[in-house]
Image (tube, helix red, strand yellow):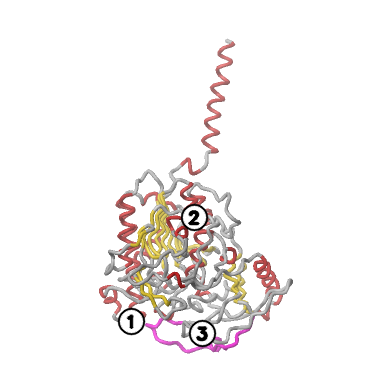
Amino acid sequence: MTQGLILFPQRAAQRLFFLVVAVVLPLSQCRRSPHIVFILADDLGWADVGYHGSQIRTPVLDELSASGLRLENYYVQPICTPSRSQLMTGRYQIHTGLQHKVIFACQPHCLPRRETLLPELLVHAGYATHMVGKWHLGMVRQNCLPTHRGFHTYFGYLLGCEDYYTHQRCFAIPGTNITRCALDLRDGDNVARNYSGYYSAHLFTKRAERIIAQHDPKKPMFLYMAFQSVHSPLEVPKQYTDPYGFIKHVNRRKYAGMVSVLDEAVGNITAALRAAGLWDNTLLVFSTDNGGETLDGGNNWPLRGRKATLWEGGVRGVGFVAGPAISPHRGVSRDLLHISDWFPTLVTIAGGNTTGTFPLDGYNIWETLSHGAPSPRKEILHNIDPLYRYTPCMSNDEDENPFAFTSLTPMEFNITMHAALRFQNWKILTGNPGCGKWFPPPDIGSRPKGPEEVLSNNPPMVQLFDIEKDPEERHDVARDHPDVVSELLKKLQQYQRGAKTPSYPREDPRCDPGKGGAWGPWRK
């Protein structure tokens, strides 16, 4: 009798122990970690997808986004390098020194090595990590390259704006009269020389299909697919422009064909995931890196501005999430989201953690994406750039008369500085945000200008917009809300106090790859 009384509590305790373990085990140990495919388009405009009313046909993107969650209040950065750096680090570019322009071929600089990158944390969580496409985060040293920053494999471009067929990039070598057109294509750390004549979007897609087909389904996979498309130069096989004969504007017609290639490529990647049996456990994220470049056929209508500006046309991104891992929440999200949010979100759903990183500016938005919970994000720093020089609307050249830059005082923000901040429904812009025109799609002709579209060469140094009521930024209400302006300037000043000095080093002539060479690391 005594022995039986002793055994019963032991069995009960064992049952209780296993029940507790089952309840408290981390989510990542109770289910398979999802495969994560992140597709980043280059220079794709707000008005360049079918589901935003474009005449450009994007059936794959339309269907995928409709099956998942469209992100209609989602923001990126105005240009390539800052967006990519924030995706990889979860930190604003003012905290990494990348708040001014992109990293050019001969600049002895890269995304700081002290930063912990997304693929590094995913490797710790047990993922196989692969990158295909455009890096654009610096290459001065070997340890700046993707395979030294957390990716097991890499195939793509280290720079940007390459020829789609020759895979060359031309740059003037500083201090010389030489403009060097050299190969920019790498397979891992090695130069990839045998791909001339292959269109880059097709080439990158084939590599992604091979990675997917060869992947061990028992191991979670992270595939970062950073397309060159649809960045200039405007190059595309003729069969993709044939359906767009109704578009008379030549650049827009070529651009439309390039968008069609991108759309087809996304379809081929999802088909490969299905064929490999991976799709049922895949989270797919689609994002652009910045607004469309209106000088090269892109369009952000009816949003104001273009790539490289702080207007909505430069920073509001096309984005969605799809795949079985996003269910049950589908539809449209109008929650405030930002590209830096992917870092903590993807690490969390992978079963990893961000312990040991520098303080993050991104938020974990998984509950917002998966169950429609309110976004934890209430504000976005679009940028603060003390080195900015105004770029006129119809040229890529810098203006000869930049806005004066005066030093900051301890208590107030220098309103001549190029900066923008979104807080709840409000958006404040200081200095000159860049080209402030509204660009109707070229294929529908010009539209008569309203009085608010007659732009001054000397805009106010402070502008305020209610983005929820006025997403086209047509009505500056700064004079009507001085209290809001004051509070947002205080926020900008607080950000600036914690900002690093922009890292924008002078170009180094030792970068010259030589005749027949390839762009790549030149310092040890």
Q: Which residue is mark 2?
A: 118
The circle drawn on residue 392 is 3
Quadrant of the drawing holding the N terminus: top right
From where the camera sits, is residue 249 visible?
Answer: yes
Seen at 50% across and 58% down, the residue is 342
- Magenta region: 439-461
Secondary structure state at the residue bearing disc 1:
loop
Magenta stretch contains residue 380: no
Amino acid of disc 1: Ile
Secondary structure state at the residue bearing disc 2:
helix
- Locate residue 118, reporting x and y percent: 49, 55
Sequence-wise, which precedes: disc 2 or disc 1?
2
Could you give the CA–CA distance between mark 3 and mark 2, rounded to whole angstroms?
Answer: 36 Å
Asked which quadrant contains residue 295, the reply is: bottom left
Amino acid of disc 3: Pro
Crowding at mark 2 (Cα within 10 Å: few <14, some 14-19, many 20+): many
- Locate residue 384, reporting x and y percent: 60, 72
The circle drawn on residue 247 is 1
Q: Nearer the viewer, mark 2 or mark 1?
A: 2
Seen at 61% across and 63% down, the residue is 378
Labelled pair 3, 2 in contact (Cβ < 8 Å): no
Compared with 294, 510 (above or below) is above
Q: Nearer the viewer, mark 3 or mark 1?
A: 3
Crowding at mark 3 (Cα within 10 Å: few <14, some 14-19, many 20+): some
Secondary structure state at the residue bearing disc 3:
loop
Labelled pair 2, 1 in contact (Cβ < 8 Å): no
Compared with 422, 119 (above or below) is above
- Locate residue 346, reporting x and y percent: 49, 53
